[in-house]
Image: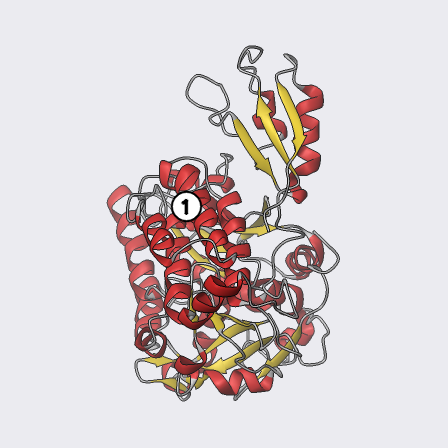
């Protein structure tokens, strides 16, 4: 993990500080400090926990916003049918470069996350809680310290996954915990039916478990004192981009978007990306009156996603920023279906041409629609959604670029990407030498996947900077000398 990624994050609360109580000073809450603010979670019977989650209308905060009570009930039904125990998994593997909320919870308030997970594990009679993380750093150290500070309870196991965009996808996380390559499974499979160790698994992100602990402490009535109609409570937002004061913000659902931007010293500028890199752009004309709730974002053609808010300010080019992100998403594909392997690079090229004044919106729309609904996971559709929203939000900018080739922005690289998102090199397989030893996939699991015969699936792979070390090891240790690294010129 880079030093920047492990740097402390400012925390703010608009309205009641629930998840962020005691975090404004920047210090980590140890168990004593945590208990001074949050009571120990009660022991609830399974039906009582389902009822509590239902009355509190608690929804997941990882992106899909699925009702937690329904997910919990599904796990209970599966355990009853199969007569087997359940597993509880905390998804803290934030693959989205623009998100820091779950990491901040683990860094500053790890016991709140563990309280919620322990509450669920107790109700489900699960003997183990698994926490999936990426990157190590301060968040993982804080989590391990919290595990050591706690008393008797379910065992807690921490599993570190590669720092990739798709590591936080639920199916990818389960595969990683089970010892397989952490990519989406390609076949829709509910964790509630068969997740970790093939057992019914309650899988939610770190914020959701923290919200569950708060709900149990407050009760449904007090929990719903703040929030939007049908969407009670607060949510965590990661506000970055051109914000002068980037922060993790706790706000009641239904808070106006411009209020959040103002609190972080941000102006809408030329656009705001909401929901992350599978989210949607809002043009300035769409921001006035927009509220941060599921219904409020749907009215604007967007979605809350994982609570990411990225204004780009007045001096950056929204087309160039979108092109950068689409190139990154193309490099982060799961390499297991045509829409990912071929469709995403085509979409990135088409949008790059558009940003350079040489392409057309029609070409971008065609590239975005080729794999619609046909990917092995939601990654191609998410990238297509981002591109389509840019075509809608930035029609005037597209017209300017068509004439001038660029709007000549004064600021570049506003949207956060891990390191330099431009490719540094290309890893190529010499098929005349490859003997299907499989060592390369073991040394570079973030880059290479094997087909059913044991050969690399792709003849060449672009290597982002953060994977350069493992790519070099794969080249150096290939017993058949079948791998080669060569420089690649980054796209504009």
Which sits in the foreground, 354 or 13? 354
Residue 86 visible in the current orientation = no
Q: Report x, y in % for residue 475.
A: 67, 23
> Between residues 411 and 397, which one lies in front from this camera angle?
397
Residue 332 placement (x, y as % from top left):
52, 45
Image vertical order of residue 266 relative to residue 439, above or below: below
Left or right relative to 466: residue 232 = left
Which residue occupies 63% across, 53% down? 418
Q: Is residue 140 visible?
A: yes
Name the residue furthest right. 3
Label 1 belongs to which residue?
A: 171
Residue 248 lies in quadrant: bottom right
**Secondary element at tag 1:** helix
Residue appearing at x 63%, y 12% in the figure: 480
Q: Residues within 10 Å of mark 1 (few under 14, many from 20)?
A: many
In this figure, what is the number of numbered marks? 1
**Considering only vertical position in the picture, is 382 above or below 243?**
above
Percent coordinates x, y for residue 93 in the rendering: 54, 53
In the image, residue 230 lies at what x, y percent?
30, 80
* Quarter of the rendering containing residue 266: bottom right
- Viewer-proximal residue among 152 and 106: 106
């Amino acid at each position: 993990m880079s030093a920047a990624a492990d740097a402390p994050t400012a925390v703010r609360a608009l309205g009641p500080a629930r998840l962020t109580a005691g975090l404004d000073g920047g210090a980590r809450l140890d168990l004593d400090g945590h208990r001074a603010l949050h009571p120990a979670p009660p022991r609830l019977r399974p039906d009582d926990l389902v009822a509590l989650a239902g009355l509190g209308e608690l929804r997941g905060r990882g992106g899909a916003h699925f009702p937690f009570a329904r997910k919990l009930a599904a796990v209970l039904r599966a355990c009853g049918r199969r007569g087997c125990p359940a597993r509880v998994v905390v998804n803290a593997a934030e693959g989205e470069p623009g998100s820091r909320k779950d990491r901040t919870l683990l860094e500053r308030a790890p016991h709140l996350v563990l309280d919620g997970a322990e509450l669920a594990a107790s109700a489900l009679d699960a003997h183990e809680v698994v926490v999936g993380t990426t990157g190590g750093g301060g968040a993982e150290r804080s989590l391990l310290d919290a595990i050591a500070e706690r008393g008797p309870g379910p065992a807690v196991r921490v599993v570190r996954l590669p720092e990739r965009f798709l590591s936080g996808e639920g199916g990818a996380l389960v595969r990683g915990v089970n010892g397989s390559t952490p990519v989406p499974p390609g076949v829709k499979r509910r964790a509630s039916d068969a997740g970790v160790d093939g057992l019914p698994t309650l899988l939610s992100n770190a914020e959701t478990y923290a919200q569950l602990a708060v709900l149990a402490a407050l009760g449904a009535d007090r929990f719903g004192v703040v929030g939007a109609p049908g969407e009670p409570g607060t949510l965590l937002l990661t506000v970055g981009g051109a914000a002068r004061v980037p922060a993790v913000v706790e706000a009641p659902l239904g808070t106006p978007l411009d209020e959040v931007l103002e609190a972080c010293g941000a102006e809408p500028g030329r656009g705001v990306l909401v929901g992350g890199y599978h989210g949607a752009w809002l043009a300035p004309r769409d921001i006035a009156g927009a509220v941060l709730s599921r219904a409020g974002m749907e009215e604007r053609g967007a979605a809350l996603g994982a609570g990411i808010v990225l204004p780009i300010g007045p001096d950056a080019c929204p087309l160039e920023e979108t092109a950068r992100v689409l190139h990154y998403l193309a490099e982060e594909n799961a390499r297991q279906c045509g829409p990912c392997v071929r469709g995403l690079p085509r979409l990135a090229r088409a949008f790059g041409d558009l940003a350079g004044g040489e392409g057309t919106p029609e070409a971008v729309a065609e590239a975005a629609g080729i794999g619609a609904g046909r990917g092995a996971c939601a990654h191609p559709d998410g990238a297509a959604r981002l591109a389509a929203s840019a075509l809608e939000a930035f029609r005037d900018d597209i017209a300017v670029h068509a004439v001038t080739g660029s709007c000549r922005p004064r600021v570049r690289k506003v949207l956060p990407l891990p390191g330099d998102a431009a490719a540094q090199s290309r890893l190529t397989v010499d098929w005349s030498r490859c003997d299907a030893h499989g060592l390369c996939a073991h040394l570079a699991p973030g880059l290479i996947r094997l087909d059913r015969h044991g050969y690399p699936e792709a003849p060449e792979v672009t290597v982002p900077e953060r994977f350069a070390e493992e790519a070099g090891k794969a080249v150096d240790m290939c017993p058949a000398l079948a791998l080669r690294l060569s420089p690649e010129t980054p796209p504009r």
